[in-house]
Image (cartoon, coloured by chain):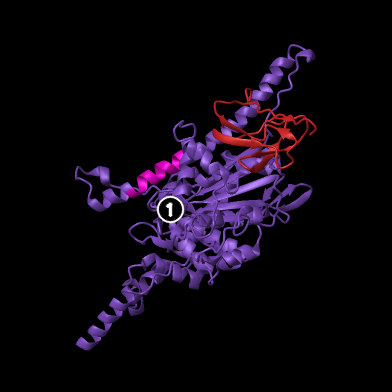
Chain colours: A purple, B red
Amino acid sequence: MSARVAVLACALLLSACASFDPGNPPLATYVPDAGYGFERLERGDNSDGLFVILTFSGGGTRAAALSYSVLEALRDTTIEWEGRRERLLDEVDVISSISGGSFPAAYYALYGRKMFDEFPDKFLYRPIQSDLIKRLFLPSTWWKLAAPGFGRSDLAAEFYDREVFGGGTYADVIARGRRPFVILNATDMTTGSPFPFIQDQFDLMCSDLAGVSLGRAAAASSAFPVGLTPLTFQNYAGTCQYRQPPWVELAAEDRESRVNPRRTARAENRLALADHGTARRPYIHLTDGGVADNIGLRGPLTAITSPNHAWSVLRMMNNGKINKLVVIVVNAATNPATDRDQTSRVPGLVDTLKAAATVPLDNYSFDTLELLSASVNEFNEDARLVEGCKKLAARNGTQCALDIPAPHHIELFPVQVAFEYLGSAEERAWFKNLPTTFQLPRETIDTLRAAGRRLLSEDPEFKNLLKAVNGCLADSEHSC
Amino acid sequence: MTFPTRRFVYIDGEQNGYTNEVLRVDAGTHVFDLGNVRNYQPASRKVMVKDTTVLEPLEIAFTKKDGG
């Protein structure tokens, strides 16, 4: 017995010395227009004129099911656009996802429409959480976990690679080479900033995203703090002749004038990650994407409002390419009931930590949605202002007609799929008390799938969109 | 961005709309130019964009170079 213990102890010690495998290979030489980027994807029949962005929030299997239901509904929605009858799903250009929402996003990036045959059984209906916990009790797992560079999320990444994504990597996604551009988001634990899995971000670290597995990206995006460990990536900055885009230096220079602190912060984050001098960060620890932005909307918001972005939508608008912009936010946020306020007892440590971990996220999500509304309103107000001025001037006679040059006009459709929009208070309460876990009963998944479809079809902006493109969402009773 | 003819506009090195149109850009310092056919002046303009509105946009003028 003692010999066995000694062998085990030696094995654990040896594994602790095992070399760290970051799962992200270095990039030999930086090539600005290479790797996984929006501009490099084939547009195919997907028009730019109707530009559709989906964002999938965090929330474990609950979020995965709700996001999946929206993809199903878009597949079943037919529209008329540019003289063709097509599926709205085929017009989706970008998907930005967080945590649980990253699983359907990644699966769609890898397998496209095949996901509708496979994903429910591969992920949604599967007791992922139990399977992961079982693996924790295997001696071979202890061996791995004894290494300081290997955590529970590395174990989860291996599991997702093998059991969910079939070992698929970004090289496979690049090989598919078509829209939508799928962006899985994690959070840089040190800076607290979003960390998107796109080549533009990996260029900063002189790393080749093509060699990263989807399982590892999804594991980083869903490394829910405490329950799952952060995932460590190697930063090879300074080894590939990387050059920052020109806007970075300009935005960093604006620090003193404070003219646009958000842009300056983005520039400084890029400079910090690419630093290969004294402030070098050889390792980057990524935690759940929800820590930085639980609805995956921050990146798209920047793309809509700034030309200085890896897939700037504003640039496309300025080029007159986009006529209708649709942003569908799938938000699986809950608000579980609590009896905390029924007693004078001081809330315990677990309760307090849970509130500290989740309440700021929800508040931030609320603010992010407000920012989306503000951006939409700004675009619409600009158009109304120009029209109003023209009308006022024209009242004084045709000689007073004004020719006010205005930016290219686009119609915006901000759609929200969230439990808070369910009409029935009882139903709302049921959904808002669903747990955040990677395992839900089959009936719950089915109920979520039905709710997502219904919420989408009932959203006022989605109805406006369908009217504008002569669209129709088929259901079990009506086909289009 | 004004210029006697319709040209591509480059903002911070990236093609971004056309001359003689109102373009949107976020606040901050940006570099504007008209690309590699250098028959215009100045060669580029570095401008801090702020406090503009749709009715009062910032005008950035380029002219043709003599003989351009």
Image position, residue A202 (x, y; %): 51, 57
| B5, above or below A122, in the image | above
Q: Which residues are magenta?
A: A357-367
Q: Is residue A364 magenta?
A: yes
Which image quadrant for residue A323? Answer: top right
Name the image quarter holding the N terminus of chain A: bottom left
- Residue at x 47% of width, y 65% of height: A216
Q: Residue furthest front?
A: B67
| A138 or A17, nearer to the observer | A17
Q: Residue at coordinates 71% horizontally, 39% vertically from top-left? A: A320
What secondary structure do most residues of the magenta stretch adopt? helix
x%, y% of residue A471?
A: 70, 47
Q: Residue at x 54, y 52 (%)?
A: A96
Q: Chain of mark 1?
A: A
Question: Which residue is denoted by mark 1 in the rendering?
Answer: A187
Q: Is any atom of residue B26 visible in this view?
A: no
Asked if the magenta segment contains residue A336, the reply would be no
Return the x and y of residue A152 as percentages of the image width and height: 36, 67
Please say if A67 is above or below A264.
below
**What is the x, y in percent for residue A285?**
39, 58
